[in-house]
């Protein structure tokens, strides 16, 4: 199946040639793929049209080195007019308008031509004129590379650096199930460009604060609960615990994956108090689908092996509910 059909690409090329004002946006609590895709596109447009990256909230320190990151606007009343006045809006790495939080209404109401490039299943209908969605893609950055390629746009080193970052983070350094032959093909094209891969990996993985490392140690030794019979493990972290380790946004990124390194654990969950709500993350190995669980029980959704949700109930209650669900929802992975 052709994701980027010729007709749409021709139309978009013409559209972008005349566009005066372009806005790029991505989901709340942006990760490497959200920032990678946004900034890859931004660095491509930078010297042409008036282009702004506007995100619903803060950027984790881990990614502040990315080219163009300093120019990102965090959405507020003063910059809202850019969304309203835009000719074209790119919607990257998310597929329902609720994922931009406070920006939702203004994004929906903007008369701009909206273009979605994303890899989450079941894109919202009626939000975008052009929807390029492929849940098989490992990262939005993988799709964005294919978009540039379809448009016959030549990208610069900065865009390639950003694409490689998103590809790296969303695949857990090319190890998650979602990593496909095509992912490696895109990575290989990017690697052929003059990007500094060692530097990118260093920025992502060797730039933790001391507090984050100690928090990870604490979480693994004191907070990880393993249910052997359900092949499941979870970690629940209170705000007070995180604050003891000088918690900064992004510090718990990847914690949900840690229990999956245990041989028999196939399903992992991470719960954390943040901004007055409980954020829930789910990961799995193999064909155990966590997006269904996130959707059904935790007001969320996502990919087969990586999903998230939220709850307004107290942390303890959320965790108790999760544990009580385990006998039923892990049927598929329980030992027979
Ligand atoms: Mn992504």
Image (cartoon, helix red, strand yellow):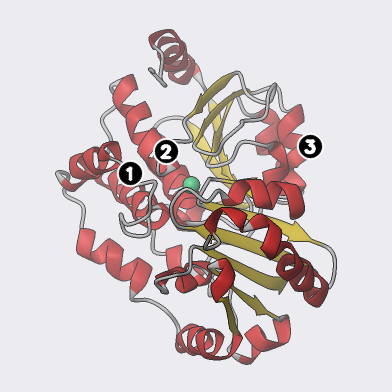
Q: Is mark 2 within 8 Å of ligand 1?
A: no
Marked residue nearer the N-terminal end (1 or 3): 3
Q: Is residue 290 above or below residue 90?
A: below
How far is disc 3 from disc 2 in space, using C-alphas?
Answer: 24 Å
- Quarter the N terminus occupies: top left
Using a 10 Å C-alpha cutoff, classify the residue at mark 2 as few (fewer than 14 neighbours), some (14 to 19) or many (20 or more).
many
Of residue 197 and residue 235, the one placed in the foreground of this image is: 235
Q: Tell whether 110 sits left or right of 267.
A: right
SS for callout 2: helix
How far is disc 1 from disc 3 in space, using C-alphas?
Answer: 30 Å
According to the picture, the residue beneath numbered tag 1 turns out to be: 159
How far is disc 1 from disc 2 in space, using C-alphas?
Answer: 7 Å
What label does residue 41 carry, if any?
2
Marked residue nearer the N-terminal end (3 or 2): 2
The quarter holding residue 83 reads: top right
Residue in the picture at 61% in, 58% down: 330
Res. 14 visible in picture: yes
Q: Position of residue 95 (x, y in %)?
A: 61, 36
Using a 10 Å C-alpha cutoff, classify the residue at mark 3 as few (fewer than 14 neighbours), some (14 to 19) or many (20 or more).
few
Residue in the picture at 37% in, 54% down: 176
What label does residue 105 carry, if any?
3
- Is label 1 in contact with label 3 (beta carbons under 8 Å)? no
Q: Is residue 286 above or below residue 151?
A: below
- Is label 1 in contact with label 2 (beta carbons under 8 Å)? yes
Using a 10 Å C-alpha cutoff, classify the residue at mark 1 as few (fewer than 14 neighbours), some (14 to 19) or many (20 or more).
many
The quarter holding residue 63 reads: bottom left
SS for callout 1: helix
Q: Is mark 3 within 8 Å of ligand 1?
A: no
């Amino acid at each position: 199946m052709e994701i980027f059909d010729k007709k749409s690409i021709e139309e978009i090329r013409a559209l972008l040639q005349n566009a005066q004002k372009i806005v790029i946006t991505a989901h709340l609590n942006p990760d490497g793929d959200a920032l990678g895709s946004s900034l890859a596109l931004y660095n491509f447009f930078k010297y042409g049209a008036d282009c702004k990256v506007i995100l619903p909230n803060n950027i984790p320190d881990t990614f502040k080195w990315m080219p163009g990151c300093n120019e990102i606007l965090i959405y507020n009343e003063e910059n809202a007019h850019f969304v309203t006045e835009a000719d074209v809006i790119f919607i990257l790495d998310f597929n329902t308008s609720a994922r931009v939080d406070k920006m939702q209404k203004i994004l929906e109401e903007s008369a701009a031509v909206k273009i979605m490039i994303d890899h989450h299943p079941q894109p919202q209908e009626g939000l975008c004129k052009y929807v390029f969605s492929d849940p098989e893609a490992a990262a939005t950055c993988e799709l964005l590379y294919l978009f540039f390629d379809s448009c016959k746009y030549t990208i610069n080193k900065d865009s390639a650096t950003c694409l490689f970052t998103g590809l790296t983070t969303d695949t857990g350094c090319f190890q998650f199930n979602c990593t496909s032959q095509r992912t490696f093909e895109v990575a290989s094209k990017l690697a052929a460009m003059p990007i500094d891969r060692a530097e990118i990996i260093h920025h992502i993985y060797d730039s933790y604060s001391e507090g984050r490392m100690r928090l990870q140690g604490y979480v693994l030794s004191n907070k990880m609960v393993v249910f052997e019979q359900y092949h499941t493990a979870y970690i629940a972290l209170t705000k007070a615990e995180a604050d003891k380790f000088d918690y900064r946004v992004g510090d718990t990124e990847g914690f949900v994956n840690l229990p999956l390194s245990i041989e028999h654990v196939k399903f992992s969950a991470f719960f954390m108090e943040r901004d007055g709500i409980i954020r829930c993350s789910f990961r799995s190995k193999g064909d155990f689908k966590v997006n269904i669980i996130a959707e059904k029980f935790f007001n969320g959704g996502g990919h087969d092996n990586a999903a998230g949700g939220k709850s307004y109930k107290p942390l303890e209650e959320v965790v108790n509910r999760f544990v009580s669900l385990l006998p039923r929802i892990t049927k598929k992975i329980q030992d027979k």
